Structure formats: C-alpha cells, structure tokens
Amino acid sequence: MTTMTRLEVLDPTQEAIPQHAVLAPRPDTLDGKVLGLLSNSKRNASEMLQMVHDVLADRYEFARVVAMDKGNASKPCPKDIMQELADQCDVVITASGD
C-alpha cells in the first residue's frame, strides 16, 4: 500500500501595493516631533535602532523619543503597545535584528 504525501508550495512574493491603498502622510520635517522606536526583541534590534536614532538626531531636534520593545519577535506587536505608540508618537521606526 502506497501513501502519498501532499506538498503545499507557498509563494513568498509580495503583491504590489494596490492603487486604492492609502499611505500614511509623511511629515515635512522631524524637528519637534516625537520619535517612536520599536524593537522586535531580536538580538541587535535595539542597537540598530539606537544607531538610526543617533544618525537622525544629528539632523533633527526631537521633542522626545519613546523607545519600546514588543517582547516577542515571533508574535505580532501587542495592541496596547501599538496604541501607546500611536497616541504618543508622530513617527515610529521599527527594526528586526539578528
């Protein structure tokens, strides 16, 4: 008796952004803005975000910086963290380390 194994092939490519999609508005400057930094908790993510912050801080004067860690790289960001960043920040940069 022969058993067959079923193999499912997934397509990892990303579809183009649909024409009806709306991108978030970008500020003209980061001066005076609250910058959010969200680490995914992988190794080196926080360090990379710190380097990005350092480069941006040479060009812009932030009102303040909110740095957070989502706590688990394998799960989506908790809604309370996303809400806190949305409420407090003008822009958010996230990073995935390794």
Image (tube, rainbow, N blue to C red):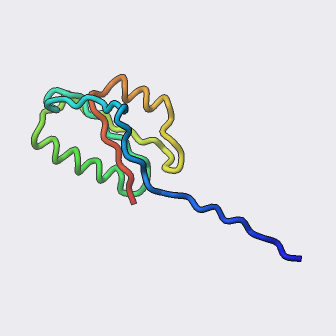
Q: Which residue is pictured at 33% across the width and 38% down the height?
A: 67
Q: Which residue is pictured at 53% across the width and 50% down the height?
A: 74
Q: Residue furthest bottom?
A: 1
- The quarter of the picture where residue 33 lies is top left
Q: Is residue 73 above or below residue 27?
A: below
Left or right: 17 in relation to 32: right
Viewer-side residue, 87 vs 47: 87
Q: Which residue is pictured at 39% across the width and 60% down the height?
A: 98
Left or right: 91 in relation to 54: right
Image position, residue 66 (x, y; %): 31, 33
Q: Residue furthest top?
A: 87
- The quarter of the picture where residue 68 lies is top left
Q: Which residue is pictured at 16% across the width and 43% down the height?
A: 56
Image position, residue 79 (x, y; %): 50, 31
Q: Residue furthest right?
A: 1
Q: Residue furthest front?
A: 19
Image position, residue 10 (x, y; %): 56, 58
Q: Is residue 70 above or below residue 9?
A: above
